[in-house]
Image (cartoon, helix red, strand yellow):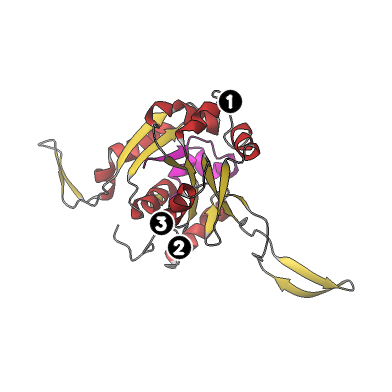
Amino acid sequence: MKVVILAGGRGTRISEETHAIPKPMVTIGGRPILWHIMRHYAAYGHNEFVVACGYKGYVIKEYFANYRTHQSDIAVDLGAGTVEVLTSATEDWKITLVDTGEATMTGGRVGRLAPMLDDTFLLTYGDGVSDVDLGALVDFHRGQDGALATVTAVHPAPRFGALEIVDGRVTRFREKPADSVDRINGGFFVLEPAILDLLTGDDCTLEAAPLATLAARQQLAAFAHDGFWMPMDTLRDRDELERLWAHGDAPWVPTAGPGTAR
């Protein structure tokens, strides 16, 4: 089952990093967040990726085109003009990198990949990590009769502390409460090729008319995920993800953390 990753946005809310690189290439623990997302999928046996590039997509292409060099120790003989790979740490991934345009919207990016998507496929965003059980997600989708799409429904990441107030006095301060009953689109979709018929061009936003149409037709399922999920929208988010990684508490990839083989 192919995994489509939307990696073409500008990431304006984290522009301190994305003025030079695309948002999916912002690093956590020395590796791009895109790598972390792919490793999560690979842990469930999904190792064929189609990356929809856009803004500064050449940076993503260069990273994977030279992946062995980036991740290995090498010996360079300038006189002889040779490069020897001393250690080789690589993944068993097949990656197709497609330029889908700088200004193309999410649905338009998927639409441009249509010739490659002739079977059920997975899709997510290139800027968020989770510990969602991808096997359970796929099984859930397959059990939804008539559903053309399944979205992973998550609780919003808590951002602010909450004050409990009685008679004008603060009685308790709760930092970042996570008890919201609301759920939002967390990405990590399972999609049928028939959804491609709803994508009308480069200006089509997947999360607008296409998913709204499926919802109206009762063809959009929701897989409830109560575990870890976090987007990397701001530098504060990046720093929090970096902190989790540095302390060995990163839950988004099995055995993730400083002790993991690089």
The circle on residue 29 is 3
Residue 141 in the figure: left or right of residue 115: right
The circle on residue 164 is none
Instruction: Kindly identify which residue carries mark 2.
Output: 251
Magenta range is 1-27
Q: Residue furthest left?
A: 80
Local SS, label 3: loop
Q: Earlier in the sequence, mark 3 or mark 2?
A: 3
Instruction: Name the amino acid type tagged 1.
Output: Asp
Q: Earlier in the sequence, mark 1 or mark 3?
A: 3
Q: Nearer the viewer, mark 1 or mark 3?
A: 1
Q: Position of residue 136 (x, y in %)?
A: 44, 56
The answer for how far apart the CA atoms under marks 1 and 2 are is 35 Å
Q: Residue at x 44, y 68 (%)?
A: 247
| Badge 2: residue crowd in 10 Å (few <14, some 14–19, many ≥20) | some
Instruction: Kindly identify which residue carries mark 1.
Output: 203
Residue 100 in the figure: left or right of residue 258: right
Q: Nearer the viewer, residue 196 or 106?
A: 196
Asked if 50 appears above or below 155 in the picture, the reply is above
